[in-house]
Image (tube, helix red, strand yellow):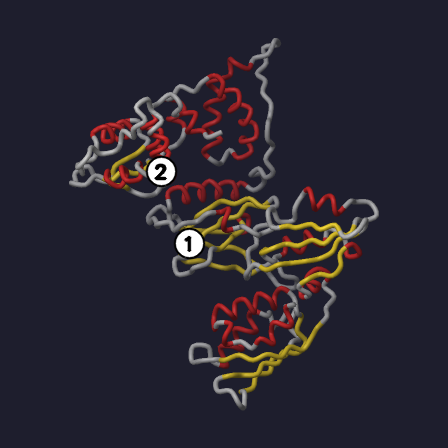
Amino acid sequence: MNLFEIILENTSLQKYALVKFFMANPNKYFTRKEIQKNMLNSYYDDLLSKSDSNINPFASAKNSDVVPTILIDRLKELIDSEIIEILDSNKKEIKYRLKNYQLEEPLENYNIKEKYKSELLEWEKSFAKYSELPFADALKIVHNNSKKQFINDKGELTYFTIVDFETPFIGKLELKENITAFYNAIKDCDVIFDLEYIGSYLVNQKPIKNTLKIFHPYLLKESKGQWYLVGKCPDELDFRILPANRIIDFKNFNDESFERIDFDPIKFWEGSVGITKLGSPLTIKFKVKNGSVYNNIDYIRNVPIVQNHQEVQLLNDDWAQITLNNVFVGPELVRSLRSFGEKNIKDVFPTFLIEDLWEINDRKQINFSVRLNDELNETKFIDFLKEKLRIKPNNENEIAEVIIEPSFNKKQWHNITINNILVNSVFYFFYSDLIKIIGSENISKKINTYLK
C-alpha cells in the first residue's frame, strides 16, 4: 500500500500523475517543457488518458510548442499545497522539484478514507520500533486521528500487528541519533565530512580506525540484524558499505550537497546472500544431504540460499545437487553453507571454497606469470600482492613467501611463485582485483587452475 496513493486518492489524475513523477525523481529540478515531455511518456500517458475523453490533458495542441495552461495550473496547485517547490521564480525559465518536507502536514491536510485508517494503524505498532525515521511519525498522526475507531467494549484502545520487523533501533543512544542524522543526510543529499569508522573482523587483527574525508550517503540498509550506511566517496567508482554501529564520528554535513548517480539497491545486491559484495559473481555447485535431525534438502528448496539464483536437482533419496548461478562469495554465503554441517556437504565447486568452509589450512605453492608496465612495476606489484593476499604479520598468510623473476623469453613478463599460501576466497578476490588493474590478457591462464 503506497501512502501517497492514499493521500492523493481524492484528487485528480493530473495531480496524481505529477506527484508520482516528482516522487520518482526527488532530487532533480525540471522545466515545464521537461515535465510535459515526461507526462507524454507511455506510463503517464496511459494514466492520464483514463479520463472520460481518453485524451492526455497535458498534450499540446497541434502545431503548438506551448505548455498547456492546465499543466501550469496543476503545478501551481502543488506549489500551494507545498508538495513541490520552484528553484527561482524570478528567472525566465522556472524549474520545479519535489519539496523536502515532513509527512505530518500532508497527512493532516488530506482526508484519509476510513477503510485505510485501520490498516495504517495496524502497521503503527511495528513502525514504532523505528521511531527515529520520519514515516513512523506519520503513522502516529493517523493513529491519533483514528483512535475513536478502535475503542473496544471496555473502553480500551486496541490494535494489532500485521508484520513484525526484524531489527528495531535499540541499544546505544548514539546509534539512534546517528541513524536519524544519516536518514536526513540521504534525503537531502548532504555531504558527510571526516567520517570515522572501525573496520576489520579478521582474527588476530586489531580493529582499524578508518577515515573518509568526503562521503556521499545513499542508503540505510538492514541485513542479518545489523544496520549499514551505504554510499561512496566522490573519487571512487565502487560503493562502500559501513556498519552503522561501527561509525564513531563525523562532522556536520549541512553545508554542502551532492548530486546522486543512479543507484538501485535491488540490482546492487542481486546475487548476494547478505550485505557483502566482493569480487565478481561466479557459479557455485555442491551436493547436500539431510542431516540426522534436520531436513536440509527441503529447507533449501523452500528457503533458497540466494533467491532467484538457485537450482536444486534431486539425485537420490539422500543427496541433492545445488547450483548457485552468478552469486557473490562472502562471509554470509560461507556461514550459510557451513550451517548444513561438514558431513552433509561434498563435491564443492570451485574447490577454493573448501578452505573457506572448513578452514583446513591446506597451504600450497602457486605459479603464474604477469606482464607489468610502468604504472604497475615490480615493486608496486609486490606491494599490491601482499596487501590483497594478506601476506603480513597477524594475518592468515603471514608465513607466505613471494618470489618474482623476469621472464627470459617474454619482454615485460614476470614469473611469480608464492609459497605457503592459502587458496581460498581471498586469493579469488586478489585475482579479480588484478584483472581490473592490468586486464586478463596480461595474466597467464595458469592461475585459473587454482580457482577451479
Mark 1 surroundings within 10 Å by alpha-carbon count, few (fewer than 14), some (14 through 19), many (20 or more) = many
x then y, percent, for residue 23: 38, 37
Question: Is residue 292 left or right of 376 when viewed as pictured?
Answer: right
Give above or below for 357 relative to 176.
below
Amino acid beneath label 1: Phe
Q: What secondary structure is marked by label 1?
A: strand
Q: What secondary structure is marked by label 2?
A: helix
Residue carrying label 1: 215
Give above or below for 114 relative to 161.
above
Q: Earlier in the sequence, mark 2 or mark 1?
A: 2
Labelled pair 2, 1 in contact (Cβ < 8 Å): no
Amino acid beneath label 2: Ser
Mark 2 surroundings within 10 Å by alpha-carbon count, few (fewer than 14), some (14 through 19), many (20 or more) = few
Q: Nearer the viewer, residue 285 or 25?
A: 285
Q: CA distance from mark 2 to mark 1?
A: 37 Å
Give above or below for 416 relative to 346.
below
Q: Mark number for residue 42?
A: 2
